[in-house]
Amino acid sequence: MGKGLRLIAGFTLAALLAGCSATIEERAAEGIEVAGKAFEDKAKNPNTEIGNASFYKPFGFEIQEGSDEQNIVLEKGGDTYVLFINPNEGKESRLFYDLLYADPSKEILETGTFERHNTFGFAGAAVGAGERVELVAGSGGRKITTLSEEGEVRKNLKTMMEIVRSVEYDDGAVAKE
């Protein structure tokens, strides 16, 4: 029985180590896939308002002082997320996606684009500072960015897409489906 338990423990440890050895490109691709699924899902209901903007703020996220209706700084667990809202861009806008590729110094790892009901969305990952990955998710005239630990890419991109998909701006420029 002792040999059997050691064998099972050995296989379990090997499986865990194999899962931890995923490349950043693989993690980015997985994150973009879950962001795409979040884009396809029904938008979360807004639960927070700042000026003319309302959006879904997940549990544990805090709005930082100095935020305004177009530049909202969120924090969770020491990580900072910046939500940009451009009320002059509609739901089909590709502006933030095009700007991602406009910076020649940015080393992009992976991006994905999505479309649903005349709404354009995207998610991407780029080489960040140190061991971190720069993540971005966008939907029309909204985008959110953060620097993420490699192991958190999948979870962060999903949450980020849920946030940008939920944004409503009361002048109607950033239209909801």
Image: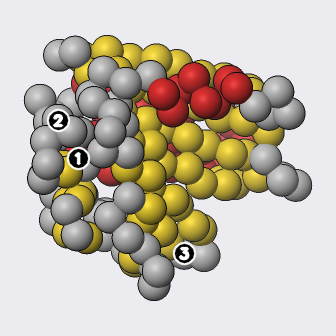
Residue type, mark 2 in image: Ala
- What is the x, y in percent for residue 164? 34, 45
Name which residue lies at 21% across and 30% down.
41
Pointer 1 residue: 166
Pointer 2 residue: 175
Question: Mark 1 vs mark 2: which is more N-terminal?
Answer: 1
Query: Badge 1: few (under 14), some or many (20 or more) residues near its Cα, within 10 Å?
Result: many
Question: Mark 1 vs mark 3: which is more N-terminal?
Answer: 3
Q: What element carries label 2?
A: loop
Name which residue lies at 55% across and 50% down.
145
Question: Mark 2 vs mark 3: which is more N-terminal?
Answer: 3
Name which residue lies at 60% across and 76% down.
78
Front-most of 175 and 125? 175
Pointer 3 residue: 77
- Give the CA separation, mark 1 to mark 2: 10 Å
Quadrant into which the C terminus falls: top left
Q: Judge from the rendering whether residue 14 lies leftward or rightward of residue 168; answer left or right.
A: right
Residue 14 seen from this side: no
Q: Judge from the rendering whether residue 74 lies leftward or rightward of residue 104; answer left or right.
A: left
Which numbered mark, 2 or 3, is in the foreground of this view?
A: 2
Mark 2 vs 3: CB contact within 8 A: no
Residue situated furthest front in the rendering: 88
Query: Badge 3: few (under 14), some or many (20 or more) residues near its Cα, within 10 Å?
Result: few
Front-most of 135 and 153? 135
Residue type, mark 1 in image: Ser
- What is the x, y in percent for residue 64? 46, 80
Q: Is mark 3 on a helix, strand or loop?
A: loop
